[in-house]
Image (spheres, rainbow, N blue to C red):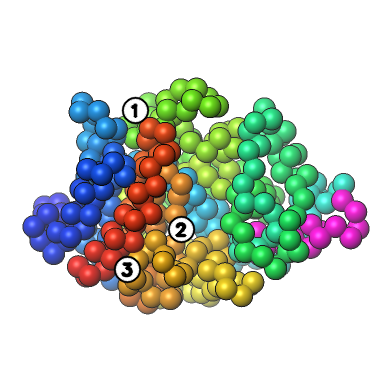
Amino acid sequence: MSDSERCGGRSGRFAAVYRVAEEAVAARAFPGCAFGVLAVGEVVLQDAAGHFTYEAESPAVGPATVFDLASVSKVVATTAAAMLLTQRGRLDVDSRLGEVLPEFVAHRAEDDPAREVTLRHLLAHASGLPGYVEFFRTATDCDSLLRACFDLQVEAAPGTRAQYSDPGFILLGKALEVCAGESLDSFTDREIFAPLGLASTCFNPVAADRAGIPPTEIDERFRRRRIQGEVQDENAWVLGGVAGHAGVFSNVPDLLQFAKEILEGAAGRSELFARETVEMFARRQAPAGSSRALGWDTPSQNSSSGRHFSPHSIGHLGYSGCSLWIDLDAAVAVVLLTNRTWPDRSSQLIRQVRPAFHDAVRKAL
């Protein structure tokens, strides 16, 4: 019996959840979505709605369909790696970035505030670095993009401004590789994805699997082709598909298993994440008023998590329309995966769908 059948499917207690998903597809918020719910250690819902694209002959999305997670990669790979390296004593979040990546400060004046950027600042999006830079416009390979990232100027004193920063996580990803002594994809695959049995989670899906992944867009400005089964984010693509800010592909069952391990860690029962580590990374950081924890986001006013996730919740969104929210108090996790950027990134309806979807889930529980 499937999870949807066990829960009564579209006519059971999650009927409002299905309604939100199906109405979103009808309104063209996205062509399709997969979703799942974990409650007190049990998967209580896994299902899907819609298709890969809006064409009538397009394949239907299933609960195990793999999606481009976009910035949800920041928690599933980068932050999770930082958590493990911290508890193993191989990473000090209060180390200055320049101590780990000397290239970041080699050319800077002694009074340059960039010298004060720490790994904590990067994790908390409080480094003062810009939010987004189109490195791919001029960078032709990984090395040239990283050099451009090393040369960035901070726009505010570190620790004084909350500014979500993709370049900050690109640098964080490289810093973690130095601490781990290997590439981010190699470390996360061996130390996180494999131990948790996340068989569908990876960077750079193999060519044979790409047709089974919903496309994210028809790229008319950079690669000039349909983007399917390769990372949509252009900077991550130039970096070879492996980056601290984007690049992971996964599905609902894997993400629910990942969320379960985080919840087990919060309860002191995980073999992967210590309770102290989960608590540390789930704690909001400076500056005052920021919703950012270490790598994770927390609910704020008008949060995408809706109105019913406790303040002791952590989560993250992805540009492609994916999200993961975990309520550490209620032991509830919700995954919503979409390709809302198909075919051209124009739809912003996901902003209304996300809180409505999470509200419907929490009311059903």
**Which residue type carries mark 2?**
His
Q: CA distance from mark 2 to mark 1?
A: 26 Å
In the rendering, at what x and y percent does residue 361 appear?
Answer: 25, 64
Residue occupied by mark 2? 316
Image height check: is 144 above or below 13? above
Identify the element where label 1 is drawn.
Answer: helix
Q: Earlier in the sequence, mark 3 or mark 2?
A: 2
Q: Is residue 198 visible?
A: no
Instruction: Please give the range of residues in magenta.
Output: 108-122
Q: Earlier in the sequence, mark 2 or mark 1?
A: 1
Residue occupied by mark 3? 332
Which one is nearer the viewer's eye here, 197 or 330? 330
Q: Is residue 194 magenta?
A: no
Identify the element where label 3 is drawn.
Answer: strand
Q: Is residue 114 magenta?
A: yes
Q: CA distance from mark 3 to mark 2?
A: 15 Å
Image height check: is 224 above or below 48? above
Q: CA distance from mark 1 to mark 3?
A: 32 Å
Q: Quadrant of residue 179?
A: bottom right
